[in-house]
Amino acid sequence: MKNSVLFYFILFLFCSCITTHNVRQIDNFRIETENAFNEESFVFKPSMLPEEAKRSLRKQFGLTNDQKLSDFDIKLFSDFESEFNVKISFDVDRTVTMDFVSPIVFDEESENIIGEAETFVKIIVVDSAGDNCLSTKSLFYNKTRSFLIDIKNNIRKEPLF
């Protein structure tokens, strides 16, 4: 009898925390389509803070101080004369779990447990005609995808000075 009561108590403790918001899982990268604009984007999760990722991306794209990382025009491929418009945005997300043990055991209000911040980088590349280069219909799809995979693989912490 004591063993079964102990078993149910331990089971209750393990099941008492319920995740209310999960961070999306991206192991390598993902090409996502936004529903609002039906626009494809290259999404990956660097293992660094957003400011560190911004410095690395600025260096990899060769941006000058007057160019904004969020929206810039650049010649991506040496074998094409046209410039491409690149838009880069950052998203920080956290896992949220609701704790139901504290109110019962410690007579407190239930609280949300917020996990560590995880950074996501979203890159959209548009050609000079205004077509998304990450669309499978684009002539630049394979070249753009390979270029962005190379960018993702070479992202690293850059010194401040």
Image (cartoon, rainbow, N blue to C red):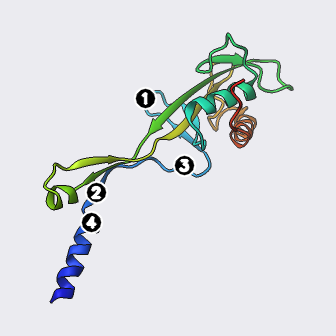
3 and 2 marks in contact (CB < 8 Å): no
The residue depicted at 17 percent of the width and 57 percent of the height is: 106
The residue depicted at 60 percent of the width and 18 percent of the height is: 71
Depth check: give the residue in front, 6 or 146: 6
N-terminal of the two: label 1 or label 2?
A: 2
- Closest to the camera, between mark 3 and mark 4, is 4
Q: What kind of element bears circle 4?
A: helix
Residue 120 in the figure: left or right of residue 15? right
The type of residue carrying mark 1 is Ala
Residue 134 in the figure: left or right of residue 36? right
The type of residue carrying mark 3 is Ile
Residue 137 in the figure: left or right of residue 115? right
* Residue at mark 1 to residue at mark 3: CA–CA distance: 21 Å
Q: Position of residue 10 (x, y in %)?
A: 25, 74
Q: Please, which residue is most extreme toward the bottom here?
A: 1
N-terminal of the two: label 3 or label 2?
A: 2
1 and 4 marks in contact (CB < 8 Å): no
The type of residue carrying mark 2 is Ile
- Closest to the camera, between mark 1 and mark 4, is 4
The type of residue carrying mark 4 is Cys
N-terminal of the two: label 3 or label 4?
A: 4
Q: Position of residue 132 (x, y in %)?
A: 62, 27
* Residue at mark 1 to residue at mark 2: CA–CA distance: 30 Å
4 and 2 marks in contact (CB < 8 Å): no
* Residue at mark 3 to residue at mark 4: CA–CA distance: 26 Å
Q: Read off the residue under disc 1.
A: 36
N-terminal of the two: label 1 or label 4?
A: 4
Depth check: give the residue in front, 10 or 142: 10
| Mark 2 Cα-neighbour bin, 10 Å: few <14, some 14–19, many ≥20 | some
Depth check: give the residue in front, 31 or 25: 25
Q: Read off the residue under disc 3.
A: 26
